[in-house]
Amino acid sequence: MMGNLESKYIAITGASSGIGRDMAIEVAKRRGTPILLARSYEKLEKLAEEIEQSTNQRPHFYTLDVTNEDEVREVFEKIYKSVGTIDVLINNAGFAIFDYVHEATVDEVKSMFDVNVFGAIACTKLVLPHMIKNGKGHVIFVASQAGKLATPKSSGYSATKHAVLGFANSLRMELADRDIKVSTVNPGPIKTPFFDLADKSGEYQKNVARYMLQSDFVAKKTVDLIERPKRELNLPTWMNVGTKLYQLFPGLIEAVAGKQFRKK
């Protein structure tokens, strides 16, 4: 543990499962107060009880569908009235559906954009005025290595993560003269329920099982960013090296490693 997050309020979208859940637990372990946001009241209530029993930190929790702008506005207004502040927003809510373009539906792609991109933007816009007024804050976007290196069957998902990275990079420059940090987390595949929907055949999980990151590891590294902010967190390191090589030599890498990209 690098320190503690005492007196800090950290809002986490998609907090009911996967790395969102693990981040909430990690924040509480470091004496921060998690603000849990997700669609399932039952899961949030259960997680809040678990966190309080194991850490003595009492989380706040609110049901939230990030695709509903009115609901986002109402929930964040409730948070500011009840809690008073949000020191860190972690835009973690997201999902994927892996499919070939000719087999995917436009509605599926739109739904990914609604959650992964517009949901993150909506939440960010609700915290920014307060952070600007307070003169400090931190917004963390959970993006993906897929936002830097697109592979077959992930065109829609990769497009959403490209968009998240573009939004975050622009926002960081807009806030360069203020004490408001903007970070992106770009992990490779993580062992979470994410793939229950994304990879219904199970082939991708089977093919990349040995490369999968552990959810609690990614969560700890992400929470580390709150204590030691930086522009990007790329996990695992070796995969990010491959991504950088692809950005420099796309044609060569596609020719040499094309078979590895077709794991889905």
Image (cartoon, rainbow, N blue to C red):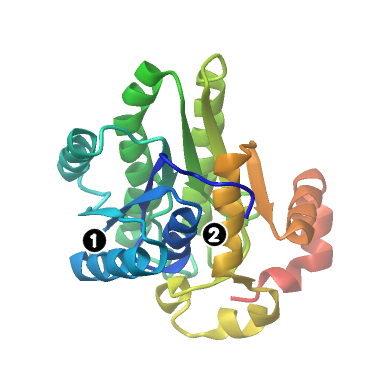
Mark 2, residue position: 219
Mark 1, residue position: 39
Mark 1: which amino acid? Arg
Q: Residue at the location (46% across, 53% down)? A: 27
Quadrant of the image containing the C terminus = bottom right
Mark 2: which amino acid? Ala
Decide: is 88 above or below 263.
above
Tell which of 154 and 63 is nearer to you: 63
Decide: is 8 above or below 103.
above
Q: Residue at the location (29% across, 63% down)? A: 48
**Number of residues whose C-alpha sits closer than 10 Å to that of mark 1, classed few (under 14), some (14–19) or many (20 or more):** some
Tag of residue 127: none
Q: Give the number of callouts.
A: 2
**Can you give x and y, in whole percent of width and height, for residue 28 in the image?**
43, 56
130 left or right of 26 in image: left
Q: Determine the image quadrant of residue 1.
A: bottom right
**Can you give x and y, in whole percent of width and height, for residue 9 in the image?**
38, 42
**Number of residues whose C-alpha sits closer than 10 Å to that of mark 2, classed few (under 14), some (14–19) or many (20 or more):** many
**Can you give x and y, in whole percent of width and height, for residue 153 in the image?**
54, 68
Tell which of 253 and 203 is nearer to you: 203
15 left or right of 79 in image: right
Q: Residue at the location (82% across, 48% down)? A: 249
Q: Earlier in the sequence, mark 2 or mark 1?
A: 1
Tell which of 110 and 134 is nearer to you: 134
Looking at the rendered image, the disc whose residue lies closer to the viewer, 2 or 1, is 2
Q: Is residue 109 visible?
A: yes
Q: Secondary structure at mark 2?
A: helix
Q: Is residue 147 visible?
A: no
Q: Residue at the location (40% across, 74% down)? A: 197
The answer to whether marks 2 and 1 mark residues whose Cβ atoms lie closer than 8 Å is no
